[in-house]
Image (cartoon, grey):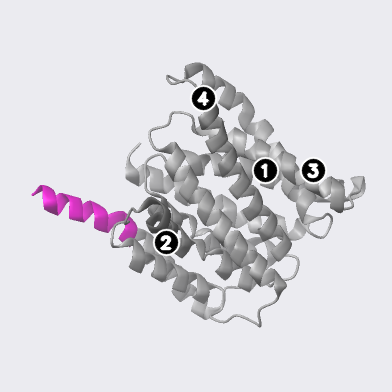
Amino acid sequence: MTRIQANLVLLLTAAIWGAAFVSQNLAMNSMGPLWFVGIRFIIGFLVVLPFAIREHGRAKTPLTPRSMMAYALCGLALLAGAIAQQIGMLTTTVTNASFLTGLYVIIVPVLSVIFLRRLPHWIVWPAALLALTGIFYLSGGKLSALVVGDFWIILCAAFFGTQVLLVGIFMSGSDRPLTLSAVQFLVTGVIALIIAAAIEPISWDGIVEAAPHLLYSGIVSSGIAYTLQVVGQRWTTAPQAAIFLASESLFGAFFGALILGERIPVLGYLGCALIFLAMLLVELVPELTKRRRAN
């Protein structure tokens, strides 16, 4: 897979996640955030498991305990991010959640520098700022007074940024993307269900009412999209991946308008243009630089 193809896969991932914002928001009318996260990722695990088993039979390298621990670490970051996001969405506005979640665009390259001592291509920094500005404009160009939910969403962005970075590290040269997906889904789902059983009420009627949202989030947003993320990140860098994945805010606004009847503010169209420009810069500038050096 080429880097361009990988980035297109990540763009598709962002589109799926953007649509999932609608399901995640509506599901909170019927069940608690921990139950939603747990059931969602157990469904995702069951979807990916047969493919992971098939991948295991074809893999050229053995699956070591160290690899399993690394994949489980991705699951812990995913668990923390997913729970923080769902809790935050209980009290914050969609506008604030959309913008603050996008903070991982900046967090990923910063973490890359701090922990890996690895400087991303220089274009990532202005592109990340462009994408973040675009997300801000897409959300209307203003944030209401911060509430507790906003801090949960900021925490969510930090954990999601960590997960993107970890996936980039552990998938470099690996031939087990589906195994990573299955393990991180299982870790996330099981731990979330254990915590939910201890502190959150649940009813069968609530599960039935939220079933369409659970199925979309579990099968499509988790099982398919997170696996696409892992596959795509095998062939691109974590900072570049973060730029493309941040376009979920753009798709979230689109599906919010399409399904919920929400409207993108006039300033939001400028935000869409800035996000698109950021993706183009990340895609084209490294390629042009490489060709110029080759000549």
Q: CA distance from mark 3 to mark 4?
A: 27 Å
Return the residue at label 2.
110
Residue at 62 percent across and 45 percent down: it is 76
Residue 220: mark in rendering: none
**Amino acid type indicated by mark 4:** Thr
Quarter of image, res 249:
bottom right
Does residue 256 appear to the left or right of 26 in the view shown?
Answer: left
x%, y% of residue 144? 64, 82
How many marks on residues? 4
Q: Range of the magenta residues? A: 281-295
Return the residue at label 1.
188
* Above or below 123: residue 4: above
Return the residue at label 3.
194
Magenta stretch secondary structure, dominant = helix
Q: CA distance from mark 4 to mark 1?
A: 20 Å
Residue at 66 percent across and 39 percent down: it is 187
Q: Is residue 22 visible?
A: no
x%, y% of residue 52? 57, 26
* Above or below 46: residue 122: below
Q: Residues within 10 Å of mark 3 (few under 14, many from 20)?
A: few
N-terminal of the two: label 3 or label 2? 2
